[in-house]
Structure formats: structure tokens, C-alpha cells
Image: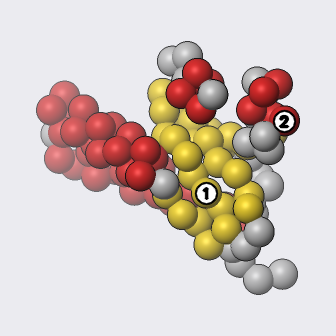
Amino acid sequence: MADRRVELLPAAWRDMDRIADWYLRQVGAAAAQRITDRLLDTMKKLETFPYMGAQHPDQELARRDFRKVLCGNYVCVYRVLGQSVCVYRVVDGRADYPKLLK
């Protein structure tokens, strides 16, 4: 099977920017680069393994076919749509993030 294309939607890019900015301010440029690389590497795996993330446990999100993949404290919330994997949000898993998608 051909690899799918991973697309980060604008909200996911904003999330990534906020995460990187926080790391930059708190622990420096090297840490910001590491977390950004780690998140992007995790999402890149979705090209080959789009269903590696669990179906989202929130019933409403699960009905809409949202899935999630973990990367440290962060959750990448996505859907497989045809040949694309659309990443909707990249959020701290400790937050009440499902409300952001409803």
C-alpha cells in the first residue's frame, strides 16, 4: 500500500508554534528543536501507519473517526481521510482538549 500524506491543519501548526515557543522560553532553543522534531517524527510515522493511533476515547470524536497518537505529554489528534492523514490539533494530553474539537 502506498504511503499517505500527512497534513497539519492550521490549528495544529499554531499548536506546534506555541509548544516550541514555550520550550524556547523555558529551557532554550535546543529543547524547542528537540520537541518539535520529536512531534514531527511521530506524525511522519502516520504516513506509513495511519491507524497506529488509538481510536479517540471520547464518544463524539470516535463517531467522527478521530484518532490520537501520543508523543510524550502531547496528543496529536487526527483523522484518516482517503489518502491523507489530517492532523487537527497537537495538545498537552493533560488538558481538556476534546472540547477544542467539538
**Residue bearing mark 2:** 63
* Residue type at the position of mark 1: Cys
Q: Residue at x 48, y 54 (%)?
A: 9
75 vs 5, nearest the viewer = 5
Q: Residue at x 19, y 28 (%)?
A: 26
Q: Earlier in the sequence, mark 1 or mark 2?
A: 2
The tag on residue 86 is 1
- Residue 27: percent from the left, percent from the top? 20, 33
Q: Residue furthest front?
A: 102
Image position of 9 with respect to 35: above or below? below
Q: Residue furthest bottom?
A: 2
Q: Residue at x 78, y 27 (%)?
A: 60
Q: Quadrant of the N terminus?
A: bottom right
Check disc 1 and report its element: helix, strand or loop: strand
Circles 1 and 2, Cβ within 8 Å, touching? The answer is no
- Residue 31: percent from the left, percent from the top? 27, 43
Image position of 16 with respect to 96: above or below? below
- Residue 25: percent from the left, percent from the top? 15, 32
Q: In screen coordinates, is 56 left or right of 22?
A: right
